[in-house]
Image: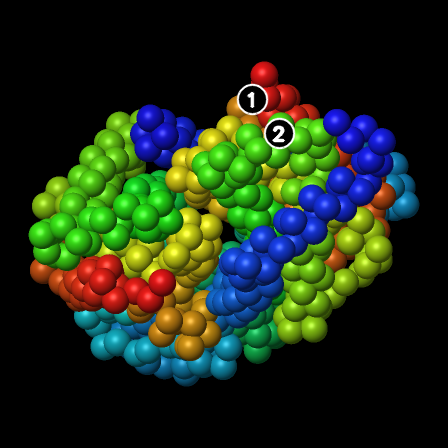
Amino acid sequence: MTLIVPPLFQLLIFSYAATFDLNQVNYAVYNQDPGIASRELLGYFKGSPAFKLAATLEHLGQMAPAIDGQKVLMVLHIPQDFTRNMLQGRSGQLQVIIDGRNSNTALVLLGYVNSIVTSFSANWAAEHGWPLPPAELKVRTWFNPNLESRWFIVPGIVGLLTLMVALVVTALSVAREREAGTFDQLLVTPLHPAEILLGKALPGLIIGMAEGSLIVLVAVKVFGVPLLGSLGALYLGMGLFILSAVGLGLMISSMAVTQQQALLGAFLFLVPAVILSGFATPIANMPDLVQHMTLLNPLRYFLIIVRSVFLEGAEISLLLPLYWPMAVIGVVTLAIAGWLFRNRLN
Amino acid sequence: MSRGMPGWRRLRGLIRKEALQIMRDPSSIAIAFVLPAILLFIFGYGVSLDAKNVPIALVVEEPSPATASLTGGFQNSHWFKPRHFSDIPSAQEALRQREVMGILWLRSNFTRELFSGGPAPIGLFLNGVDGNTARIVAGYVQGVWGKWLARYAQDQGRELGLPVDIQQRIWFNPEVRSTNFLVPGLIAVVMTLIGALLTAMVVAREWERGTMEALLVTPVRVREILLGKLIPYFVLGMGGQILSVAMAVWLFEVPLRGSLWVLMGVSALFLVAALGMGLLISTVAHNQFVAGQLAIFTTFLPAFILSGFIFDIGSMPGWVQAITHIIAARYFVEVLQSVFLAGDVWPVIWVNSVALVIMAALFMGLVRLRSRKRLE
């Protein structure tokens, strides 16, 4: 039960939680302009589901406490001459003050404000006979036209949770037997180390594949993430990924003398593997040295595979450069684990 | 029964015993100091949401001075690493192969449309798989394009007529450096791990080896056993916390605008909650194997995803927001980001400190309750 219920709960909760899109952002308005332009502009904000008017400010002194105390994330300040300027063909000034404590949220928010103001501006320019701009930018987005971050995150969570399950099954398994002394008994039986290795690896592989399939099913059926590519491409990736995760888990486990050490080892691998996988922050933004380090991280390859298969419909041939590194990691770590079975110094 | 023996001497004995055990298996010390050092080091350098040198394809079908001035804007911007492609199919192939993040497409009629009063169309294609990065890149492109537009209009001797001029101010982090909010948030994630890992195994280990029963038949009280477990690991954990703050300030140059004492006080509260959670895992699990599994499931990913360290809690659905309230890291992240970047904002500090006290009391209370039941 501990292997099935927690990952499914986490899939549901995390898939809803992990999004860079903003919703119902609390903002305040400090409007000094009695004219129609400001009223019209504020109407655009009221009509947007991304924003929620939380306060109307009477004077400038109220601004800092509202933002500092996190009552609002943003204040819109419209000066007195906003409408007058715009009616006379000059630009009206809109001040946007944003809480930058989470600077990514601030940037996303600023993007939303820009697009609302742009559509208001276009409308106003058309109605009041402003000259057209000499050029206009038309943006088209491939694979994820509405830039829904859920489409990006949910396939990522498939990778995260599969990795967790594989580690949970394997990372403590050898260490537990070593601590209890039963592993030595196992080693003096006529079993070949390769057979012991297989016995330790198979449960992780089977449980990991079953769990991974369940998670993919939920991603498609519950979250409606489009699965454009073939299941073959996805499962080849998943199989190799779980092989590498199981190998790493067993390697950690056979290095440790106690379960406490195995748990520490599991975290020393799990946490960097997740953070440096491109799950939430792009690998391209990392310094070169760290980017090279990510080449050792199986999750990095699997995340690209899952996302490409889901959203871009990528085929096996295009993904070959991503499959073989995981296979290499899996084989090497399993071999080290098997060697450590006998040669670990106690 | 040695009833005359004062409680603090028994407690001191227990702490001494625990300290000796810590010394024997160095993994506890590794958890407190090596784990935060390695993790913060990797994250502080590795994790960034600031896209720079974004590879972008430029397709100019009919070069002219006007197109050259626009593409020059991309060449000079440190956000972009532009690559020229001769036609749109080859650029689209590069986009498919993930060699470029986007394509800027100036069609053959661009210059003509521009001179005849426009609006001349500029096409921008983006790979939207990573929606967040795509949005950030679109913002950068709009910035370069807007600058070019204003300069072009000026050269034509007219003002760029946009009805609304947005003046943005981003408080606390005007240069929008993502390290400034990611590193304080990571401290909360790392401390969650340290707190839970230090204690998740210790009680379970004693149950597994039968030494817990041995302890329970002595006159030592449950409360004293728990304090004896808590205090040594608290000292270790605070050491890890001081190391983390020092790295944030000196290595990653995150400004610390609030006071160090507030930061340490709230950290202490959080650490008690995190250690309490580890003890609870340990007490519930009763053996190290299950305790380890529970620790992997319940600590890292919830603290990573539900703490608001990277994903905005206010934008989550209501029921998920409700769940985030049982994640202690959530309160700590809010205080850390405020104290580092904004200063001592007391409304934020008070609310979250009270929540942390409640969390700590809840965890410790549950641990006591469970331990007493075992005794009977």
Q: Which residue is mark 2?
A: B216
Q: Pick whichever of labels 1 and 2 is earlier in the sequence.
A: 2
Quarter-wise, where is residue A34 in the image? top right
- From the viewer's perspective, tell me whether residue A320 is left or right of residue B154: left
Query: Looking at the picture, how far across and down is residue B130, in whole percent?
Result: 38, 53
Secondary structure under tag 1 reads helix
- The kind of residue on which mark 2 rests is Leu
Q: Which label number is shown at residue A317?
A: none
Of discs 1 and 2, which sits in the foreground?
A: 2
Q: Which residue is mark 1?
A: B374
Q: Residue at x 44, y 55 (%)?
A: A261
Q: Residue furthest front?
A: B1
Query: Looking at the picture, how far across and down is residue A131, in whole percent?
Result: 55, 56
How far apart are labels 1 and 2 at the CA level? 10 Å
Q: Residue furthest top?
A: B376
- From the viewer's perspective, tell me whether residue A336 is left or right of residue A92: left
- The kind of residue on which mark 1 rests is Arg
Relative height, residue B55 to residue A33 (above, below): below
Query: Looking at the picture, how far across and down is residue A171, in whole percent?
Result: 34, 49
Look at the image and tell me in which quarter the N terminus of chain A lies: top left
Look at the image and tell me in which quarter the C terminus of chain A lies: bottom left
Does the rendering let one see residue B152? yes
Q: Residue at x 44, y 80 (%)?
A: B75
Q: The residue marked by circle 2 belongs to what chain?
A: B
> Tag 2: Cα neighbours inside 10 Å, few (<14), some, or many (≥20)?
some
Q: Residue at x 80, y 49 (%)?
A: B265
Q: Nearer the viewer, residue A55 or B256?
A: B256
Q: Nearer the viewer, residue B255 or B124?
A: B255
Relative height, residue B194 to residue B302 (above, below): below
Query: Looking at the picture, how far across and down is residue A283, in whole percent?
Result: 40, 64
Q: The residue marked by circle 1 belongs to what chain?
A: B
